[in-house]
Amino acid sequence: MTTDQTVGQSVDQPAEAPVDGQPAVAAPSDGANIDAAPMADSVAAGDVPVAVQHPSGSGPERLINELRHHPHGGPQLPPVGVPEQDLDSLIPANRRRRSKLGLPTTSEPEILRHFGRLARRTFSLQEGLYPLGSCTMKYNPAINEALVRLDGFAQIHPYQPEDTVQGALRLLYELEEWLKEITGMDRISLQPAAGAHGEWTGLRIIQAYHRDQGEGAQRDTVLVPDSAHGTNPASATLAGLKSVTVKSTAQGLVDLDDYRSKLGPHVAAIMLTNPNTLGLFERDIAEIASLAHAAGALLYYDGANLNAMVGVARPADMGFDVVHLNLHKTFSTPHGGGGPGAGPCGVRDRLAAYLPVPTVEKREDAAASRYFLDWDRPQSIGKVRSFVGNFAVLVKAYAYMRAYGGDGLRQVAMDAVLNANYLKALLGRTFDIASSEPSMHEFVLTTKKAKDLGVRNIDLAKRLLDFGFYAPTVSFPLTVPEALMVEPTETESRETLDSFVAAVEQIWEEVQTNPDVVRHAPHETPVGRLDEVRAARHPKLTWRS
Amino acid sequence: MLKTIGVDSQEDLFASLPAGVRRAPELPEGLSEQELVEYFTTIARENRDLTQLDGFLGAGAYRRFIPAAVTQVISRPEFFTAYTPYQAEASQGWLQSIFEFQSMIAELTAMDVANASMYEAATATAEAAVMAVVHTERHRIVVAGTIHPEYLAVLRTYGAGRDFEVVELVADSGRIDPERAAAALDGAAALIIQQPNFYGALEDAAALCQAAHTAGALAVAACDPIALALIEAPGEFGADIAVGECQQLGIPLWYGGPYCGYLAASTELLRKIPGRLVGETVDERGQRGFVLTLQAREQHIRRESATSNICTNQALIALGATAYMGVMGAAGLARVAEISVQRAHHLAGELAGVRGYSIGFDAPFLWEFVLRCPGPASETLAKLRDRDILGGLDLAASGLPDCVLVAVTEMNSPRSLAKYVEALS
């Protein structure tokens, strides 16, 4: 185990060194002794000073392997309870692990304090506004976390016989019905684990469809706007399709002339986000769809921005053939520091046969409804993930939908668009807006005038952290110079939005009067500006390396 | 707010939508929180869960004891309401915990590096195949017929798109013969094995990896992380890429998800790894800190040339696994494994003594084994079901209609083992 002395923070005794004879299940005072680190004690303790923890959650935190080692730590486990056999007789010697397993053994109070300190070093939605454009960081209802902890959801195995999981199957069936109504699609697979996974699933379905039309080899290209999420072309590559970029107009909408010129018998699909990543509704969507269909291509809906449309307009009615949804965005399932999400993939009737197996079906018996998994779908693209999907995420999304109901979901979109436009009107007084087209749930600022004074968009973003806000999405979409993409969502109050505006205005003031304070931001976070170049040039990805 | 924006109504904000696309969904009214609890509790009760049934199902998802501390960590809103730590300075807690996850997976697998997580084991396996195809510029993946059938199915779906052929090696009594593997590996990008394999048996992993390397192919191994506390790690038996499932590490069964895949590799393959990587660096004051790194591999930078399309991963589940490994430590993990091994072998021994029953394969195993029944597996499982026992997975779909795959963990009490034997005696 390492004791990294280069970081300006001393660490505890080397883990291998036997520590005092404290009992394995450490008493709280034991943890306090180490972690609170009263300075007099620790400095007096020996040559290796004990780390001083900063009171406000600032400064680095030790790594878990640098915590005090408890040789007899770890949890109490039950006795074997059956006659034991010699392990060496059960596992051949040449199959046994040879190297020492370097997982530290410490005490429960120390572990929980460690993660407590890490939690304090993490800005979250629970702490304040998280206006990360395209990510829809809305409030995650507390009740949904409780519901997935019910034994009937948490303690069921994916291979249980169908008659023992009728509730789970019913829930999946009902969720599909709701998502069908919201998107206008005819069938939906809940199996994809995330948005990008749903994209790839949708593209595999589109390929299967073209193959059955006798055009599989010929239609090898996907058209993707230059403002699209990076996942779109990356998913195309993973599906074995080429990506061709469609230009945007100066206003940020699909350039119809460029689009027309790139359509043809080689095009399998067009992937669109609507509203797009500039937060603009593609007003020519009907024409875009009819041109695609006339060329024999299918229209793919990247559902990342459905929050502006939910309950208001349906992708199917816009002419889309395939959609994926990000349940962790529109339907509020927590983003979990990067996941888990869920990326259901929906299709129109003519594509339904290609959905991943299994689908969830209902059979009406005389007595009752019976739900089952249908594996017998010969045209299916196959499995895209093990088991049925991120079930607990699906439970949370369904609970969210049921809590809001049809009218409530419509209000979600209305309020998300209201909040974004309010913020845009106010921030537009300070910075330029990338497009003069009407905005939906998000908008993009271009901070070129700060750049003219030597302050980049990333500096502004970092400075916002000092004001207690997370930063907007930086430098995306790629079509907008010095972009900051702002999405407040519907769950923020006007008061919060006003305070965000005040922070941006003050930062702009600083750019003009004291640019260094912005350029070297953040100042109030647990660590200062981090050296990303060094991290990439000298990759240190584990504590051992 | 409307006045500030300069519109008369919220409706006006949607003026850019063509009339033809406007449509309110026909869905029921919303429920109060109390009604919501009642509704979902009713649905949950329509399931018979493993607090009511004695479960011996495994096959890639295992019921293990979850220390309350793990649940407490992943229930902290600071963690679950954040997103991918793009702003590193305000996300040090998350970044550090991912760094710890990467470090712990590297320790367990004895590999050089590990990423921040994959969706689950099947997609991690498929992504490892993509890495091998890119690395070797070969387009054939040879797969042990003893890997989980769903991993194989997902691999085939990926392969059909990413232009690689999947060749399945037929098993000999529940394992892969290294000589047979060697014969099939000519021109292959990778050999993929599972350890212990789908049937619970320990493969001759070192010989299989050797065969792959002889043919110039990469060796990919899918390994149960808890097993690695006892058995040879992929870094020890020569794997180039190790993948697997972290559900066993403190995550509820949840009917199949969310779980968390891991992917670890040798340094040579570092720049072909899919997904997020967290690296250590320093801040302006010289303090240690962590950032997302080597992002030039990823979709938001490289777009169509990225190593993968993965964006959202399973970070919160990986945090649960990190907390679990932290709480258990090396000794706790080994102890959990040993209890499972002892109980599984006890049950297997007892069942082998019941008339008509035998252990399917003569191979070393840990806590999962194949039980051969006197008739169709479904009849045995029905008999057990009458006693509220889910006896395991019917292997009919794997071409073994008289076999049941039985998994035993520390959650299967000695009493439940006796009940299992008694039901078949």
Image (spheres, rainbow, N blue to C red):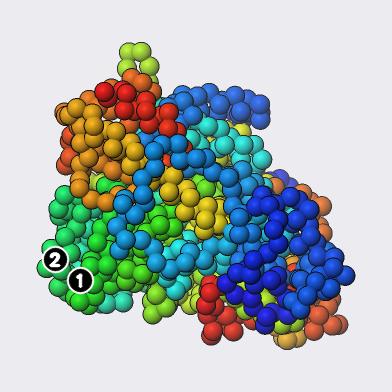
Residue A442: give x, y in percent of width and height.
63, 59
Q: Is residue A510 above or below residue A155?
A: below
Label 2 crowd bin: few (<14), some (14–19), many (20+), radius 10 Å: few
Asked if the residue at tag 2 contacts the one at tag 1, i.e. Cβ–Cβ closer than 8 Å, the answer is yes
Specify whether B362 is left or right of B298: left
Residue A534: give x, y in percent of width and height.
59, 84
Q: Nearer the viewer, residue B225 or A59?
A: B225
Residue sticking out furthest to the right: A40
The amino acid pointed to by label 2 is Glu
Q: Nearer the viewer, residue A106 or A448?
A: A106
Image quarter (top left, top right, bottom left or bottom right) of the N terminus of chain A: bottom right
User: Mark 1 belongs to which subunit?
Assistant: B
Q: Which residue is mark 1?
A: B211
Specify whether A199 is left or right of B349: right
Q: Which mark is residue B402?
A: none
Q: Helix or strand or loop: what does disc 2 sit on?
A: helix
User: Mark 2 belongs to which subunit?
Assistant: B
Label 1 vs label 2: CA separation? 8 Å
Q: Quadrant of residue B195?
A: bottom left
Residue B192: give x, y in percent of width and height.
27, 63
Residue sticking out furthest to the top: A367
Label 1 crowd bin: few (<14), some (14–19), many (20+), radius 10 Å: many
Q: Quadrant of residue B242?
A: bottom left
* Residue at 64% over, 59% down: A70
* Residue at 23% over, 72% down: B210
Residue A328: give x, y in percent of width and height.
55, 50
Q: Which residue is mark 2?
A: B179
The amino acid pointed to by label 1 is Ala
* Residue at 73% over, 86% down: A454
Q: Helix or strand or loop: what does disc 1 sit on?
A: helix
